[in-house]
Image (spheres, helix red, strand yellow):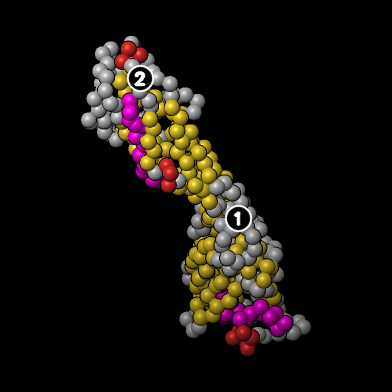
Amino acid sequence: MASKKASWSAGLCAGLLPVLALAAGNNHLPPSLMSAITPVTAGGSTTNTCQFINGSGTSRPTIQLPQSIVISPADPVGKKYYIGNASTSTIQLRCSGYPHRSWGYSTAMQQQSGTLYRTSVSGIGIRIKFTERTPSQSLTDYYRWPRPAGPGLGGTFNSTTSFTLELEKYAAVSPGTINLSSPVVDLYIGGLTTFGLYPSNSVRVIAANPTCAVNSGSQNIAVSLGSHPQYFFNQVNKTTTPVPFNINLNCSGGGSGGRLSINYTLRDTHAPNNTSSTLSLAPGSQASGIGIQVLKADNNVIALGQQQHAGTVGTGTSSFTIPLRARFIQTSSQVRPGNAQGQANFTMTYN
């Protein structure tokens, strides 16, 4: 927020992957696993013979995604809008024979490049890295599509898997919503889903809003309300002709579809708790029995201390003007002539 002032006078101056090797021919395994690949020969059993042991079961960790991310045309390709982590519980199971397994994204994904896949918002991709830890080793790789799949060796397995999910810019981005499958990735082996990684929510992609600031010429605004004969003020609430003035803003920036709401609040400088629609006269004023009102362009009087909506600025707008008007108002049946001054601070609020 920015606080400025206007004054009136002169009359007023106004996971489980490392230990479960796939059959030969699958090149999506981490290189250190290749030596563990065992081809399945004709007649080999491929029945699903896995079961959880020691009270283990399917692990369903949640990745806590942001409710929204803000984009700007100035964001470079490769910018990571989000990096988040999650981890499974310990998974224990026993498999016999050559249980079938597959792991990766749970629905079809379009590869952008390398391990980056497109999301439902053009220009933003997703990358998920996993690290699986067993009592004897730790290996890291990335999820892919199509899903690696095939028969693996049986045995007893004990592991945990951690995940790192990234949302990254790969091209120009437009506002929208990123909706990920639930689960977004999972591991299937021998008739069991050992884990699934679940997104906490969809992600709104919001264009960066433009920014505005008060023009240097509007930092301090002097408004002359002119001179008026004493006999003019012959009844309470009588007003003079309003004098126009403007609060000018400079604006810039913003992404496609960006919008900025502009609001302002006027306060009586010399009576901060004044919540009426009439500014008091400043100390040193000779006149009495009159006050000052500030009006909108439509002649509606502005209540002091109450936020007023001035309008909305879109991307590409370089300036914005708030047209206002000021006038004297008779507040007492007895008016004393002399110099009349008043002052108000205006506070800008942008959202």
Q: Are marks 1 and 2 in contact (CB under 8 Å)?
A: no
Q: Residue at x 26, y 23 (%)?
A: 338
**Residue 214 picture location, percent across and down:** 44, 45
Q: Residues within 10 Å of mark 2 (few under 14, many from 20)?
A: some
**Residue 310 picture location, percent across and down:** 48, 36
Magenta highlight: main SS: loop
Quickly name the residue at label 2.
228
SS at badge 2: loop
> Foreground: 10 or 172?
10
Which image quarter: residue 193? bottom right
* Among the two numbered marks 1 and 2 on one chain, the one whose residue lies closer to the N terminus: 1
Residue 5 can be seen, yes or no: yes
Q: Residue at x 39, y 38 (%)?
A: 221
Q: Is residue 114 left or right of residue 291?
A: right
Inspect the image, locate mark 2, and give the three-letter code of the amino acid beneath it: His
Q: Residues within 10 Å of mark 1 (few under 14, many from 20)?
A: many
CA gap between label 1 and label 2 equals: 64 Å
Quickly name the residue at label 1.
178
Which image quarter: residue 41? bottom right
**Residue 33 picture location, percent across and down:** 61, 84
Residue 105 can be seen, yes or no: no
Inspect the image, locate mark 1, and give the three-letter code of the amino acid beneath it: Ile
Q: Is residue 106 left or right of residue 164?
A: right
Magenta stretch bounds? 1-30
